[in-house]
Amino acid sequence: MLKVAVPNKGALSEAAALMLSEAGYRQRRSTRDLVTIDSDNDVEFFYLRPRDIAIYVGAGTLDVGITGRDLLLDSGAAAEESMPLGFGASTFRFAAPIGTMTGAADLQGKRIATSYERIVESYLSDHGIEASVVHLDGAVESSVRLGVADAIADVVETGSTLRQADLEIIGEPILSSEAVLITRNGAASPSGFDVFKRRLDGVLVARTYVMMDYDISTEQIDGAVALTPGIESPTISPLRREGWVAVRSLVPRDQAQKVMDGLWELGARGILVTDILACRV
């Protein structure tokens, strides 16, 4: 039975559970549940702190895990990213009191508070910056005001929390993170992993694409196919109406309206867009 670690709370928890449900896996009924067994799919889910997931997977206790890229890299665990999952996007940045610094070079000799000690130390080392890293478990924004640090390094989404603490972002992003599927470094794929990953791939495609159907004259088929090339190739079927064909193709969801406009201008008619619930490509 494939053993999968899933975030038990926080920003990644709900989105991970939704993705797994869309992939056809049973999820826990209560947030108090620590384990869920999906015997139909031969998978066992363990709900753990997101920061601990890479440790369990790296140790080989669990086969697969869903966590943040930032948490994986900061853990130092013997685990590696298998695929990005398309949710939980965030940016890891330096921030300092407004008007005091402009870039990472200004951190030389300073104290930096963070909950992601390994990531920050690695960045400083790679950029030749000598600074002290102060490890805090949370609420690092208060550390400057309280005199513990001169700057901070933390996950930034909207920046509103920084502004409330009279801080501003400095320098380039340290890391762009999102939810990722992880496995143990160098380990052979556990039984059931290929199916599990394929299902998640299918969810990503279903979320990213829509199915588009339309009718068009054979004279305009080349232009239409250029607009709707699909992932591999569109399906083209003859219609009873002479000189016309029906076309079916996957189209990126965020481009669907623009593609429909282009097809209409080419003379396509009966243009339909359908959501995809699941797929294998």
Image: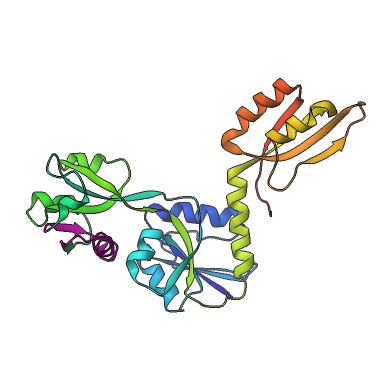
Residue extending furthest toward the front: 128
Q: Is residue 204 magenta?
A: no
- Residue 218 lies left or right of residue 146; in this view the side is right
Seen from the viewer's position, the closer of residues 80 and 23 is 80
Q: Is residue 114 magenta?
A: yes
Farthest-out residue, left = 147
Q: Is residue 44 left or right of residue 198?
A: left
User: Which residue is nearer to you in this view: 25 or 78?
Assistant: 78
Q: Position of residue 126 (x, y in %)?
A: 28, 62
Which x, y percent locates residue 200? 58, 57
Placement of the C terminus among the 4 image quadrants: bottom right
Residue at 70% across, 20% down: 265
Residue at (16%, 43%) from the top-left corner?
165
The residue drawn where x is 13% and y is 54% is 143
Residue 80 appears anywhere in the view: yes
Residues in magenta, as a range: 109-132
Q: Is residue 203 above or below residue 239?
A: below
Q: Is residue 235 left or right of residue 155?
A: right
